[in-house]
Image: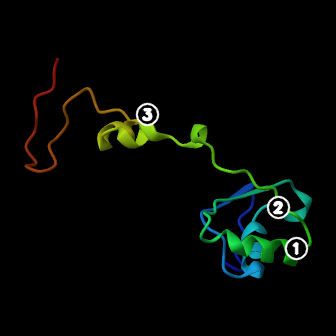
Amino acid sequence: SRGLHIDGVTHVINYDLPQNAEDYVHRIGRTARAGADGMAITLACEKYVHSLADVEKYIRQKIPVMPLTDEMIVTDYLKMPGRARKKEIQPHRKRAKVPTRGRVTGRKVQRPK
């Protein structure tokens, strides 16, 4: 959103193209503040890519386009059950090996000695 400034933002990923070219410039402007390097990546389908020409005209610069290839699509991940996906996303989270106090009943669980 406009007026938002967060230090250290180096990348902006747009999951769509804004309908207004000026909004696009404001979105990608969250990165590369004060002469720092930054990158903006925008995902766009054929239905909405028409506004790319408006953005290029507004910024007076050609935006590099990379078509989606089969190698970029992660289909195995989508086939994984929800629990497996969650473990892959959060591998650092492990279950406690020692039983702890139960949350539902509040009763104590015997701990191994």
Determine which quarter of the picture holds residue 95: top left
**Relative side of 62 to 45, left or right:** right
Q: Which residue is mark 1?
A: 59
Q: Which residue is mark 3?
A: 91
The one nearer the camera, 60 or 69, is 69
Mark 1 and 2 residues: CB-CB less than 8 Å, in contact?
A: yes
Q: CA distance from mark 2 to mark 3?
A: 36 Å
* SS at mark 3 in the image: loop
Is 8 located above or below residue 84 in the figure? below
Q: CA distance from mark 3 to mark 1?
A: 41 Å
Q: CA distance from mark 1 to mark 2?
A: 9 Å
Is 96 located above or below residue 113 in the figure? below
**Relative side of 36 to 87, left or right:** right
Q: Position of residue 90 (x, y in %)?
A: 43, 39
**Relative side of 61 to 30, left or right:** right
Q: Which residue is mark 2?
A: 63
> Which residue is painted at 75% across and 67% down in the image?
28
The 10 Å Cα crowd at callout 2, few under 14, some 14 to 19, many 20 or more, is few
Residue 1 in sight here: yes
The one nearer the camera, 58 or 40, is 58
- Give the quarter of the figure containing the N terminus: bottom right
Residue type at mark 1 is Ile
